Amino acid sequence: MNDKKIFIVEDDADLLYGLESEFSADNFEIATSYGDEEVSELLNNIRSFKPDFIVIDLILPKADGFDIIKKIKADEFINQEQIFVFTDLSEEDGRVRSLDIGTDYIFFRDDFDTYEFAEKVKKIIVNREKIVADAPEDVNDVDEGEDPGIVFA
C-alpha cells in the first residue's frame, strides 16, 4: 500500500498513537490531529496534506465529528476522500447520522482494538482498489461517495 496517505483525527493519545503505528507499518504516509484545533484549521490541515483516506472519531474536544464530516463533504478540494468513522455513539444514532452526511464506512467500537480496526480499513482499501482496477473503464467514473458501508467492529 505504498504511497497512500491517511489523515487521522482522534483525541485519545493512545488510540491515535496505535492507529498511526498500525498504518505506518504498511507504509501509509500519516498526518494526525487530536481534534483540538478549530474546524477551519483542521480542514486546512487536511487540504494541505491531501489524503487518500480520512479516519475520524465523532466525539472530539472542540468540534462535533458530524460537523467536520459535513464540511469535508462540502469542500471541493477534499470531498472525494473516503471517510472511515469510528464511534462510541449508539449504533442507531451513529449509523443514521453518519450515513445521512455521507460517511463511507462506520465502525462501532466496543473495547476498541487499533490493530483490528486498522486491518479492516486496510482490507477495505485493498478490495476497493481491486474493484476499481478490474472494472470496465466507464465504471471507474462512478462517484465513490455512493457506496456507504457499515462495519460493526
Image (cartoon, helix red, strand yellow):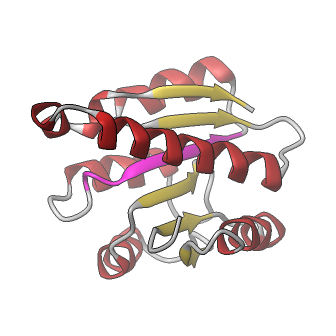
Quadrant position of the C terminus in the picture = top right
Name the residue at 79% across, 46% down.
116
Residue 18, position as x, y percentages in the image: 79, 67
Height in image: 6 above or below 115? below
* Residue sitting at the far right: 111
79 in relation to 143, above or below = below
Q: Is residue 77 visible?
A: yes
- The structure residue drawn at horizontal position 39% and vertical position 68%, both measured from the top left corner, is 51
149 drawn magenta? no
Q: Which residues are magenta?
A: 79-87
The reply, left or right, for residue 37 in relation to residue 75 is right
Residue 103, placed above or below residue 117 = above
The residue positioned farthest toward the left in the image shown: 138
- How many circles with numbers are drawn on the protein? 0
- Residue 103 shows in the view: no
Q: Position of residue 119 (x, y in %)?
A: 71, 49
**Secondary structure character of the magenta stretch overall:** strand
Residue drawn at the location 68% of the way across and 66% of the way down? 11
Q: Position of residue 1 (x, y in %)?
A: 53, 64
Judge by depth and name the residue closer to the eye, 36 or 119.
Answer: 119
The quadrant where residue 27 appears: bottom right
Image quadrant in which you'd find residue 130: top left
In the drawing, does residue 4 fall left or right of residue 120? left
Residue at (50% x, 59% y) in the render: 63
Q: In this image, 63 relative to 120: left or right?
A: left
